[in-house]
Amino acid sequence: MARSFLESALAGTLPSFAGAWEAQRRAYPPGTPPSDADFLATVRTHVVHLLGDGRVAETTRFFYALERLLGEADPILEELLERDLVGALAVECRLAAIDVRRIDPYLGRRTRAAWERARA
């Protein structure tokens, strides 16, 4: 099963996520891969757990890759990432009572702007 662009760009930054996501991908029927929305929802859930557990190394790699991806994104991908990954992650972290001080040091300029818009 072919990996989507988002999977290729982000899944490798989260080693503890890669195996679980690969197993989940295999659960989809042949010819119907998971959507980008499915992938992003699963990534968000995983990142919230990592932040809650204080797993700094993985979250650092994830946020650095996300910042780089936002910098290279076309307007459509940028909107998708800002809305369905960064913005939704900000909301989910707030709901999970993740202290923003665990996240703030890892946010780059673009990621921080999207995060702040979601928190407003």
Image (spheres, rainbow, N blue to C red):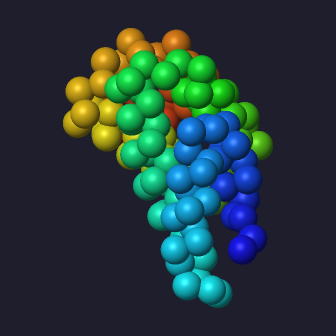
Quick check: 104 above or below 31? above
Please report the residue visible at 46 percent of the width from the left and 37 percent of the height from the top. Answer: 47
Q: Nearer the viewer, residue 111 or 95?
A: 95
Please report the residue visible at 25 percent of the width from the left and 33 percent of the height from the top. Answer: 96
Please report the residue visible at 31 percent of the width from the left and 39 percent of the height from the top. Answer: 91
Q: Is residue 70 left or right of residue 118?
A: right
Q: Is residue 89 left or right of residue 77?
A: left
Residue 80 in view (yes/no): no
Please report the residue visible at 64 percent of the width from the left and 87 percent of the height from the top. Answer: 31
Quick check: 30 above or below 115? below
Q: How many marks?
A: 0
Quick check: 101 above or below 20? above
Residue 92 in view (yes/no): yes
Spot occupied by residue 28 in the image (x, y as percentages of width and height): 53, 78
Q: Nearer the viewer, residue 55 or 68?
A: 55
Quarter of the image that includes the N terminus = bottom right
Quick check: 76 above or below 89? below
Spot occupied by residue 27 in the image (x, y as percentages of width and height): 52, 74
Q: Nearer the viewer, residue 46 or 19?
A: 19
The quadrant holding residue 52 is top left
Spot occupied by residue 61 in the image (x, y as percentages of width and height): 65, 27
The quadrant holding residue 95 is top left
Quarter of the image that includes the C terminus = top left
Spot occupied by residue 66 in the image (x, y as percentages of width and height): 63, 37
